[in-house]
Amino acid sequence: MGLRSSRLPVVTLLDGQVLVDPSDAEIIDASGPKIDPERQVFDVVVVGAGPAGLAAAVYAASEGLSTMVLEGEAFGGQAGTGSLIRNYLGFPRGISGAELAAQAHRQAWLFGANFYFMRRATGCAAEERS
């Protein structure tokens, strides 16, 4: 590609885009659906995609509310790295944190929740809609 080693890593996406020394957020933005939280209006914004945030997203989206989940890293939070979670509702014999997080993420997404990864909330305000 004619790039010098000081300009690594290089990420080539399936659509042909080439990203040179991208941040995690730039990779997410280039490879996923575009969400513009400055212009879009959501009924519910969930900050954090750990088990509680994912549960909130499932409940909100399943009720037909437009839902966005902001997550600074990846879904699952600290629980996502747990080998066996035995105190979560519905899994009396336990479930791995990764599987719990994956199932909850998939369920929220199927109900229509939007996920905005590699972003952190810097403020929060409620606005009246007419």
Image (cartoon, grey):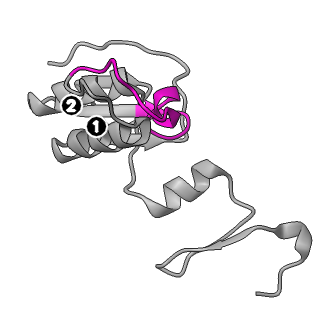
Give percent across and percent down for residue 112.
19, 43
User: On the rendered structure, is 29 left or right of 6?
Assistant: left
Q: Earlier in the sequence, mark 1 or mark 2?
A: 2
Asked whether the residues under the numbered discs 1 and 2 touch, taking CB atoms below 8 Å apart as contact, a structural biologist would say: yes
Is residue 113 visible in the rendered image? The answer is: no
Quadrant in which residue 63 is drawn: top left
Q: Which percent across, then down, holds residue 90?
A: 19, 25
| Helix, strand or loop status at disc 1 | helix
Q: Nearer the viewer, mark 1 or mark 2?
A: 1
Q: Amino acid at mark 1?
A: Ala
List x then y, in percent, for residue 88.
30, 21
The region drawn magenta spans 70-89
Q: Closest to the observer: 37 or 111?
A: 111
Residue sitting at x 33%, y 34%:
95
Crowd tier of the residue under label 2, counting other residues whose Cα lies within 10 Å: few below 14, some 14–19, many 20 or above: many
Classify the position of the N terminus by image quarter.
Answer: bottom right
Q: Quadrant of residue 103?
A: top left
Q: Is residue 75 magenta?
A: yes
Judge whether 36 appears above or below 49 on screen: below
| Residue of label 2 | 58
Residue 13's quadrant in the figure? bottom right
Circle 1 sits on which residue? 104
Kindly identify the amino acid type of the residue bearing the numbered disc 2. Val
